[in-house]
Amino acid sequence: MTRQAAVNACFGEGIDPSHAASYIDYYAAINPWMAYWETAPAGRISLSERDCPSSSFRDSEFYTDWLDQQDHLKANCALRLDVDRTNTVLVGWHYPLDQAHHADRFTEDILRRIKDDLAAAVRGAALLRHGLERSKRLGSIIERIDAPAVLVDAGRRIGEANSAAAGAMARGDLVSGPGDVLALRDPAAQRWLEETLARLLSRSHQPYERATFAAGGHVVRVGVTRAPGFGGPDLPLLVRPRPQALVVIEPLVGGTLRLDADSLKLAFGLSAAETRLCELLANGRSLAEAADALRLSEGTVRQRAKAVFQKTGTHRQGQLIALVSRFAAD
């Protein structure tokens, strides 16, 4: 589990599998016992009827819709062991309330006797997770991507990077990796990346997102794909590695960026000629170069650009490019 009450792994006997699955999927997040365990120190062995009786939250949704369905879960003895700053393992027994007066004593004694061995097992599981996270997962696959590609976790910590990404970080023009943390030079792109990783690495979100940005004379398309998880039915893990995502930063140069004219017309009322001007600017052309490409005077192009600024609500060329580049055609 995490401090946000998300269950990363669950192993148990004597509970209906569907009941356990509903706990993992929903009821863990509203379990009132979690408030107690968040403040209990590591190594604490607690008895529910002594420290946090289930009767104290009898009117809660958790109790009425989940706990009350199985009487043999209403009392428990458990041990808290911390994996790291944000992950905790709880080990213990649940039993009926009418057995608590004698079950409390022997379950607490058993946990006290084996606590050191359990703590050593949790440390070993944490070391296994660290080794899995640092292992080369994508290897030659990521190296074949013809653009900077980086494998990161939700905190943007870099696990793997291909040679193109290493070169881009060494130049520092589009992307950097201070302290092995991925950072995009453009503030808008950076915010999008942080928000996308948070959404994409949650369990309920689609596995792929993409957006286009203009920054420092460059136009780049950033794609984020959730990487395959560790483990599975044949590899149950007590402490699962943190989910990771593959970030691909594809430079768009030399007129390769094409804008979706229909979408720009619908969104801002841009004409085909205005969309063509935006396309030239988004591919790094100056107004003078755009005028040459369109075979128009520079004054005419400036008037057209002014009309585009008004329709899109932008005020500077860089701001316009950042906006229209998000309407890239597939």
Image (tube, rainbow, N blue to C red):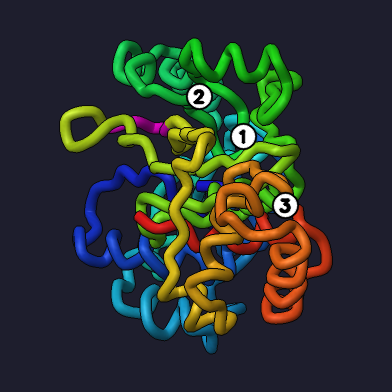
Q: Name the residue nearer the viewer: 80 or 181.
A: 181
Q: Which residue is mark 1?
A: 156
Q: Which residue is mark 2?
A: 148
**Residue flagged by tag 2: what amino acid is it?**
Pro
Which numbered disc, 1 or 2, marks the residue that appears first in the sequence? Answer: 2
Which numbered disc, 2 or 3, marks the residue that appears first in the sequence? Answer: 2
Left or right: 112 in relation to 40: left
Which numbered disc, 1 or 3, marks the residue that appears first in the sequence? Answer: 1
Against 25, residue 127 (above or below) is above
Give the image location of residue 196, x and y in percent: 55, 53
Left or right: 267 in relation to 63: right
Tell me the quadrant of the picture where the C terminus can be found: bottom left
Q: Which residue is mark 3?
A: 287
Against 168, residue 270 (above or below) is below
The residue that appears at 59% across and 12% down in the rendered structure is 167
The residue that appears at 51% across and 73% down in the rendered structure is 264
Tag 3, which secondary structure?
A: helix
**Residue flagged by tag 3: what amino acid is it?**
Leu
Q: Which image quadrant for residue 155?
A: top right
Estimate how packed mark 2 is, as few (under 14), some (14 to 19) or many (20 or more) residues with alpha carbons within 10 Å: many
The residue that appears at 30% across and 19% down in the rendered structure is 141
* Span of residues in magenta: 236-240
Give the image location of residue 60, x and y in percent: 53, 84
Q: Name the residue nearer the viewer: 277 or 224.
A: 277
Q: Name the residue nearer the viewer: 189 or 193.
A: 189
Estimate how packed mark 3 is, as few (under 14), some (14 to 19) or many (20 or more) residues with alpha carbons within 10 Å: some
Q: Are marks 2 and 3 in contact (CB under 8 Å)?
A: no
* Residue 2 included in the magenta stretch of the image: no
